[in-house]
């Protein structure tokens, strides 16, 4: 996942609803003449159905949808709406942001949904509440934007525990939330790569997308840890420890990704001497013969 930095541009107008402006832009002297507003509950409901009918065939489509759900969220918040429809809006916004890869807008959706709406409105689906709560924790676990240490692979543990402690008991014991907390535990222990690979193996597609960016940062550290512990390691074991042995971890996998990682992190490692075994470093007293660069 990446932070939202792009300019969304203008949204193509295929319907009068696309002409609706942000509520925050209707606070000036011309607000009274602005006509239809997203503060109106009926307009909000029509706008949500309009959003759900839009295509999601490209990243551009998704970017426009993120802007639209942001506009709708603002209208719902400005109208003071706290009901099942508000929950549906924020859950829809979260799903679209995950699909589009917009972390900043996803965080805004989830923090209000989990902290404000779910406690006030009993959700229709306990499973969805658990997933959304787990996604919020995963975002916090994988957020290293405020980390001063370039090697750090996790967010502020105190903030994460605080959010976790405010969740209802049934949500705290749910699988998505427990996975998020196990992920934090694995990362704060200077990366427990065995526990990390187990969490990833159990994670669903949505969770794996949120974890993918953190994995790209964690893999070089894991590889250096393994290189200090082992001279050689079976290929399958190395792929598993680096979380490169599965499909859909969000940022590539398999032996090609491993080859590039080895070249970047251990450029002077010994030459390969045995099929199915990866040399990480030379034994003491043995001079390493560096791997030749791929043509």
Image: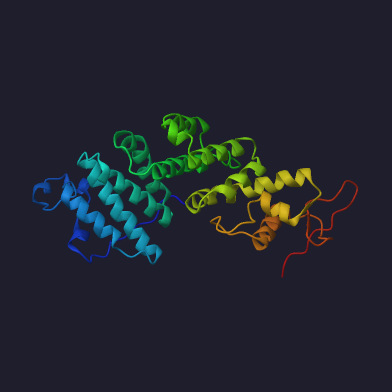
> Which residue in the rendered view is the most extreme toward the bottom?
295
* Relative to 46, 265 lies left or right: right
* Relative to 56, 223 lies left or right: right
> Which residue in the rendered view is the most extreme toward the left?
33
Q: Position of residue 284 (x, y in %)?
A: 88, 46
Observer able to see residue 222: yes
In the image, what residue occupies the spot 35% across and 47% down? 91
Q: Position of residue 202 (x, y in %)?
A: 56, 48
Instruction: Count numbered badges in the picture.
Output: 0
Query: In this rendering, is residue 120 above or below 8?
Result: above
Observer able to see residue 145: no
Name the quadrant of the C terminus: bottom right
Colour approach in the figure: rainbow
Query: In this rendering, is residue 214 above or below 63?
Result: above
Query: In this rendering, is residue 231 above or below 183?
Result: below
Q: Position of residue 152 (x, y in %)?
A: 58, 40
């Amino acid at each position: 996942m990446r932070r939202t930095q792009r300019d969304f541009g203008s949204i193509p107008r295929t319907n009068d609803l696309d002409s609706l402006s942000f509520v925050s832009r209707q606070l000036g002297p011309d607000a009274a003449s602005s006509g239809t507003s997203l503060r109106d509950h009926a307009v909000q409901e029509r706008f949500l159905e309009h959003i759900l009918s839009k295509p999601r065939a490209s990243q551009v489509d998704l970017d426009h949808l993120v802007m639209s759900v942001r506009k709708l969220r603002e209208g719902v918040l400005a109208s003071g709406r706290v009901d099942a429809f508000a929950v549906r809006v924020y859950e829809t916004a979260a799903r679209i942001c995950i699909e589009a890869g917009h972390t900043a807008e996803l965080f805004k959706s989830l923090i209000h949904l989990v902290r404000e709406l779910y406690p006030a409105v009993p959700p229709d689906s306990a499973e969805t509440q658990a997933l959304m709560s787990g996604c919020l924790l995963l975002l916090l676990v994988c957020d290293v934007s405020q980390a001063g240490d370039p090697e750090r692979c996790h967010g502020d543990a105190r903030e994460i525990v605080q959010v976790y402690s405010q969740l209802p008991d049934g949500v705290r014991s749910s699988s998505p939330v427990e996975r998020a907390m196990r992920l934090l535990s694995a990362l704060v222990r200077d990366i427990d790569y065995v526990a990390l690979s187990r969490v990833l193996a159990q994670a669903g597609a949505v969770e794996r997308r949120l974890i993918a960016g953190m994995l790209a940062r964690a893999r070089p550290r894991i590889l250096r840890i393994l290189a200090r512990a082992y001279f050689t390691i079976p290929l399958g074991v190395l792929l598993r420890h680096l979380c490169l042995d599965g499909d859909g971890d969000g940022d590539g996998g398999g032996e090609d990704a491993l080859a590039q990682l080895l070249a970047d992190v251990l450029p002077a490692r010994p030459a390969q001497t045995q099929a199915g075994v990866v040399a990480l470093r030379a034994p003491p007293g043995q001079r390493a013969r560096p791997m030749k660069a791929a043509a």
